[in-house]
């Protein structure tokens, strides 16, 4: 079941129709009050969440979802000009965002990608071990051997995304968008600096973060999850 919290009735109905034609179950809500009633009764597989809502807005709804500890995937629906809202949403735990106006097939593609990733969350939930690297995802604790490693939020998110796609090359723009909510070439230095610092902090385990020249970065490590 996919929930869409969107106050624009025409958008809400169009998205529900499109999802149902693609084999998904979907339900829509015009305000947060009705959304929470349904959410408490039945948890969805994914939430499409508009930011601009009457009453409780989308950012507040996202905060409540994540504060409760619920890991349901959330895709934010944002106006094209509100980059601040995109970054805020991603920082608060949104899994993706789609800018309005959006193409229906693009939205469905994003939904499928997020659902696919959420099915692989065992790698970035609970405890992760790889060589000397140990991570307690729920506690945001990282160790190399017996030594605790202090990471910034961005360094932690960068490491999480690299491990989530273990063995897969993530290009620079993908990493910039996932971690910072931006995808500009001129921000590549931001990514490179964070990768360099992350490798340094992880000491010998930093070698598992590899540079793929002209493309981006990948994490190489054998999964040993508890």
Image (cartoon, grey):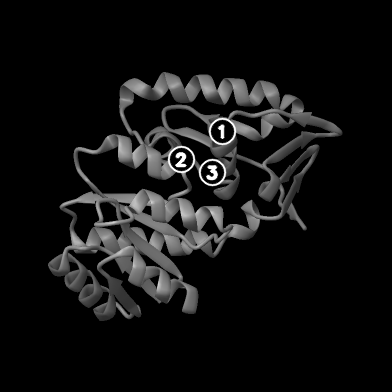
Image quarter for residue 207? top right
* Residue in the picture at 60% in, 45% down: 163
Image quarter for residue 161? top right
> Disc 3 designates what residue?
161
**In the structure shown, which secondary structural element does the residue marked by tag 3 occupy?**
helix
Q: Position of residue 73 (x, y in %)?
A: 46, 60
Q: Foreground: 152 or 113?
A: 152
> Of tags 1 and 3, which is closer to the observer?
1
> Disc 2 designates what residue?
91
Of marks 1 and 3, which one's residue comes earlier in the chain? Answer: 1
* Residue in the picture at 48% in, 73% down: 40
**In the structure shown, which secondary structural element does the residue marked by tag 1 occupy?**
helix
Q: Position of residue 89 (x, y in %)?
A: 39, 44
Q: Position of residue 144 (x, y in %)?
A: 79, 33
> Disc 1 designates what residue?
153
> Of tags 3 and 2, which is closer to the observer?
2
189 is higher (above) or lower (below) than 116:
above
Q: Would residue 147 appear left or right of 217 to someone viewing this image?
A: right
Q: Foreground: 99 or 208?
A: 99
């Amino acid at each position: 079941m996919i929930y869409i919290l969107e106050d624009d009735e025409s958008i809400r109905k169009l998205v529900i129709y499109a999802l149902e034609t693609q084999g998904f179950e979907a339900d829509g809500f015009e305000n947060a009050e009705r959304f929470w009633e349904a959410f408490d009764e039945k948890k969805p597989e994914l939430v499409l969440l508009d930011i601009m809502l009457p009453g409780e807005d989308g950012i507040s709804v996202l905060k409540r979802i994540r504060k409760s500890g619920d890991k349901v995937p959330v895709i934010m629906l944002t106006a094209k000009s509100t980059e601040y809202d995109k970054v805020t949403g991603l920082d608060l735990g949104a899994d993706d965002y789609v800018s309005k106006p959006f193409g229906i097939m693009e939205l469905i593609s994003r939904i499928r990608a997020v659902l696919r990733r959420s099915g692989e969350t065992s790698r970035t939930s609970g405890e992760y071990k790889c060589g000397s690297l140990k991570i307690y995802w729920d506690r945001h604790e990282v160790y190399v051997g017996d030594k605790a490693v202090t990471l910034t939020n961005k360094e932690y998110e960068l490491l999480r995304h690299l491990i989530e796609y273990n063995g897969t090359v993530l290009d620079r723009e993908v990493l910039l968008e996932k971690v910072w909510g931006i995808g500009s070439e001129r921000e590549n230095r931001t990514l490179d600096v964070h990768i360099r610092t992350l490798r340094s902090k992880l000491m010998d385990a930093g070698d598992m973060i590899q540079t793929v020249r002209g493309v981006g970065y990948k994490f190489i490590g054998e999964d040993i999850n508890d």
